[in-house]
Amino acid sequence: MLKNDTIEVTRECEAMLIPSGVKVTIQKGSLVMITQALGNSYTVYVNGNLARVAGKDGDALGMVILDEPDVNEMVGTTEDKVWELLKTCFDPEIPVNIVDLGLVYECKISEGESEQEVEIKMTLTAPGCGMGPVLVADIEQKIHAISEVKTVKVDLVFDPPWNRSMMSDVAKLQLGML
């Protein structure tokens, strides 16, 4: 059902343009094709553009509503919660999460008196990859859902350069490389 089926949007819904990360509204009656359904979101082709629609708006696409788990009910540290959320972030072109792809190099949590700052260093599969803005926006939005986190900073770095050896065995298996 996900490939090549044109769907009429049944109600207005918010989306994020890929790769720019700009928020837009998809109007009721727009025709879309769903290209991917991963990470509690749908990637759709609409009006010549790719856009990411949050899973909570799946009904607008005639699909299942994909609820985000309430990260604040999870047991564990803030860092545990951040890593779990990072595993729900997917490059719109690759059906593997950014953690298993080996794109996340570092995650630091700075503790203040009443707030925490999360700093993430990550890379892209290639320096010219245009998916950086949409990935950064997705990460920031998801990490801000953690109640104790007040600031999220995502730095795109290219040293060391990413290579296939950084992928987990799970990612290699998903991509047919094992």
Image (cartoon, grey):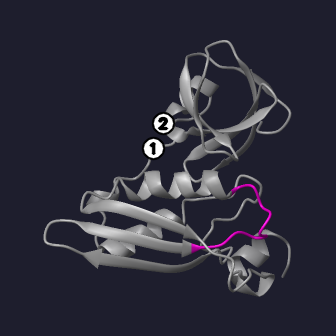
Percent of width and height locating residue 140 = 46, 56
| SS of the residue under disc 2 | helix
Q: On screen, 46 above or below 56?
A: above
Do the residues bearing badges 2 and 1 touch, measured as CB atoms within 8 Å? yes
Q: On screen, 39 above or below 24?
A: below
Residue positioned 37% across, 55% down in the render: 144
Q: Is residue 84 left or right of residue 132?
A: left
Residue 30 lies in the magenta stretch: no
Task: Work out how far the residue at label 2 is from the one at label 1, CA to CA, in angstroms.
Answer: 6 Å
Q: Which amino acid type is marked by label 1? A: Asp
Percent of width and height locating residue 155 = 54, 69
Q: Which mark is residue 49?
A: none
The N terminus - image quarter: top right
Percent of width and height locating residue 5 = 82, 29
Give the total of numbered labels. Answer: 2
Q: Which amino acid type is marked by label 2? A: Lys
Q: Which mark is residue 67?
A: 1
Residue positioned 77% across, 55% down in the render: 93
Residue 126 lies in the magenta stretch: yes
Q: Which residues are magenta?
A: 122-131
Q: Is residue 38 left or right of residue 12?
A: right
Tell me the residue that label 2 is attached to: 56
| SS of the residue under disc 1 | loop
Quadrant location of residue 51? top right
